[in-house]
């Protein structure tokens, strides 16, 4: 299942499923419709409990929510514009009608890995880290495929980083590596956008990694059951039409199960936590000449089975609140 968070008209972000690349089904409303058609008197409350309209709440629901979503999709088959839906709410949309945001809107954590590709270490001459090296981003950095990457006035060097990200599907602490895959809810593409001059100046990465819209992700979250082996995926990134990163997740130093187990020794993993597994070689700051992004560029990322994520670079505007 390809989970998205979408906006339509006056609605806030709601959980949907991309069915064929051209349509999105609102899972909560589709489940409401199924229950209403069956005569369930409390269909709205029951649908909100079983198939919530938010990705994190949905993941908390576990197997019951996944089963409800599958039933909702089955019931929505063949519906193109159900204006006469039993629940009284439209739940099927053409892709061009909606705005896609980050597939996960409000995670407890965004955890990122550094120095986690063998080809990156070879290119830079850096040693293999003795343990996974982690840092964090804040939720303000999240954005989706229909959002721009904002070029902050504070930096002069805007970098790109294509990354495989996984999302935790259930709560876990001290997870053994052999059971780690049970705790992954899904996978998506993530761009770990970086202000390289600021990370160099600060000697740590928080400021340079967590400006608004510095973590574009999507276009969807692919459920883990549809990607049983994340360890052999081609990973690519282009700026405009120029291929600047190309690798495979076979090059990961610490793979997904290792990361789940390691991180669960540090803190309790929660449903919706995003883990970006690191980037391969080809970074802008290490190229000669450098290839930092500029206003007007389009940065496109692609990972096998996880689709393409493209975002245009726009200048920061002065805003006050």
Image (cartoon, rainbow, N blue to C red):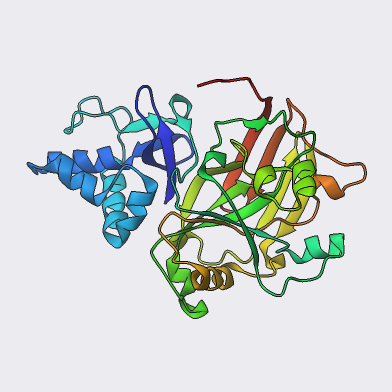
Left or right: where 144 falls relative to 193:
left
Residue at figure coordinates x 36%, y 55% from the top left: 59
Residue 175 on image: x %, y %: 46, 75
Residue 11 on image: x %, y %: 34, 27
Left or right: where 88 falls relative to 77:
left
Residue sitting at the far front: 202
Total numbered badges shown on the rendered structure: 0
Residue sitting at the far right: 288
Left or right: where 205 falls relative to 19:
right
Residue 225 on image: x %, y %: 44, 62
Nearer-the-camera pick, 303 or 292: 292
Which quadrant of the structure image shows residue 275?
bottom right
Residue at figure coordinates x 17%, y 40% from the top left: 44
Q: Is residue 90 above or below residue 202?
A: above
Left or right: where 105 falls relative to 124:
left
Nearer-the-camera pick, 317 or 232: 317
Q: Is residue 192 visible?
A: no
Residue 16 on image: x %, y %: 38, 41
Q: Is residue 261 above or below residue 192?
A: below
Residue at figure coordinates x 19%, y 28% from the top left: 88
Q: Is residue 37 visible?
A: yes
Which quadrant of the structure image shows residue 271?
bottom left
């Amino acid at each position: 299942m390809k989970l998205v968070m979408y906006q339509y008209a006056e609605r806030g972000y709601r959980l949907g499923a991309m069915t064929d690349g051209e349509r999105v089904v609102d899972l909560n409303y589709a489940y409401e419709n199924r229950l209403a058609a069956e005569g369930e008197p409390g269909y709205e409350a029951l649908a909100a409990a079983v198939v919530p309209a938010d990705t994190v709440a949905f993941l908390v629901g576990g197997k019951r929510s996944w089963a409800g979503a599958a039933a909702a999709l089955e019931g929505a088959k063949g519906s193109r514009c159900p204006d006469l839906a039993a629940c009284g709410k439209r739940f099927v949309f053409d892709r061009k009608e909606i705005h896609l945001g980050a597939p996960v809107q409000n995670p407890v954590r965004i955890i990122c890995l550094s120095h986690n590709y063998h080809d990156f270490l070879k290119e830079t001459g850096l040693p293999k880290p003795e343990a996974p090296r982690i840092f964090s981003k804040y939720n303000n950095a999240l954005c989706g495929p229909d959002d721009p990457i904002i070029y902050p006035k504070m930096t002069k060097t805007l970098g790109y980083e294509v990354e495989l990200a996984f999302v935790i599907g259930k709560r876990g602490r001290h997870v053994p590596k052999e059971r780690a895959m049970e705790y992954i809810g899904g996978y998506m593409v993530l761009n770990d956008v970086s202000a390289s001059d600021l990370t160099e100046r600060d000697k740590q990465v928080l400021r340079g990694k967590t400006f608004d819209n510095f973590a574009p992700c999507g276009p969807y979250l692919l459920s883990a059951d549809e990607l049983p082996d994340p360890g052999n995926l081609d990973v690519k990134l282009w700026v405009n039409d120029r291929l600047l990163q190309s690798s495979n997740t076979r090059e990961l130093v610490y793979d997904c199960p290792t990361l789940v187990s390691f991180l669960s020794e540090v803190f309790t993993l929660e449903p919706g936590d995003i883990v970006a597994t690191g980037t391969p070689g080809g970074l802008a700051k290490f190229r000669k000449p450098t290839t930092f992004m500029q206003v007007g560029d389009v940065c496109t990322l692609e990972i096998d089975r996880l689709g393409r994520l493209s975002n245009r670079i726009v200048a920061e505007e002065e805003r006050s609140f």
